[in-house]
Image (cartoon, grey):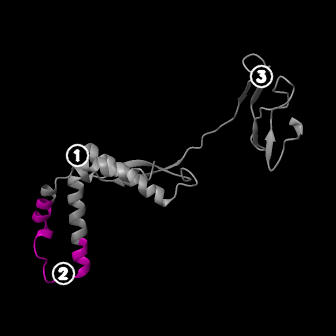
Amino acid sequence: MSARSVVLDGLQQHVLSPTHQTGGTLDLVITFNDFGVDELSVEPPGIVSDHSLIICSLPVHRLTSATFFRQVRSWRGVDRATLRQHIADSSLGHAPSSTSNVDELFQTYDDTLRNIADQLAPERSVNCRLRARPLCPWFDAECSAIRRNCRRLERRYRRTRDVYFFYTKRCKCQRWD
């Protein structure tokens, strides 16, 4: 089979000259038919090895991920005692009037908690990337859950320096590694 005849199932072989000292074509550059090679050079064999050095330039265009903005709040920085005090001082900290209907009570609840949240943890806009595809074909929901748990335990260990979390992470993450 010659180097020129290697075309199968939508693939194309681009090295058309011999790549070995004895004259055979052993080193290949194979791409899909619709994927061209910008530059290809075959250096003569015998300089470092009995094979040729193949240098090629491929037109790789990195696709940009779709991005979107979402509103988030930094709840970690909120002091629970302060939050509790704000709720107690608001209209939610008192018994509702007996003449209020369900819709009014819900609106009061929603407005009050939203105002308290705006004071203690203001919303901010975050730019997020939308993953178009999974990291790998084998990376399923179970792998994702294991990785998430490993990273959660690692963060907890770094924050607390508690040896329990170190060994728990090590044990749980052996399934991931």
Q: Is residue 105 above or below residue 18?
A: below
Q: Residues within 10 Å of mark 1 (few under 14, many from 20)?
A: few
Q: CA distance from mark 2 to mark 3?
A: 90 Å
**Which residue corresponds to mark 3?**
50
Element under disc 1: helix
Q: CA distance from mark 3 to mark 1?
A: 58 Å
Quarter of the view holding residue 45:
top right
**Which residue corresponds to mark 2?**
100
Q: Residues within 10 Å of mark 3 (few under 14, many from 20)?
A: few
> Looking at numbered disc 3 in the image, what kind of residue is underneath it?
Asp
Q: Position of residue 23 (x, y in %)?
A: 87, 26
Q: Is residue 112 magenta?
A: no
In the drawing, does residue 120 fall left or right of residue 2? left
Q: Position of residue 122 (x, y in %)?
A: 26, 52
The range drawn in magenta is 84-107
- Front residue of 13/101: it is 13
Q: Which tag is nearer the camera, tag 2 or tag 3?
A: 3
Residue at image position (24%, 66%) is 111
**The N terminus: image quadrant:** top right
> Looking at numbered disc 1 in the image, what kind of residue is underneath it?
Thr
Q: Is residue 54 visible?
A: yes
**Which residue corresponds to mark 1?**
160
Q: Main secondary structure of the magenta part?
A: helix
Q: Is residue 110 above or below residue 75?
A: below
Element under disc 3: loop
- Front residue of 94/26: it is 26
Q: Is residue 141 above or below residue 3?
A: below
> Looking at numbered disc 2 in the image, what kind of residue is underneath it?
Ser
- Front residue of 66/28: it is 28
Residue at image position (77%, 32%) is 27
Q: Is residue 85 magenta?
A: yes
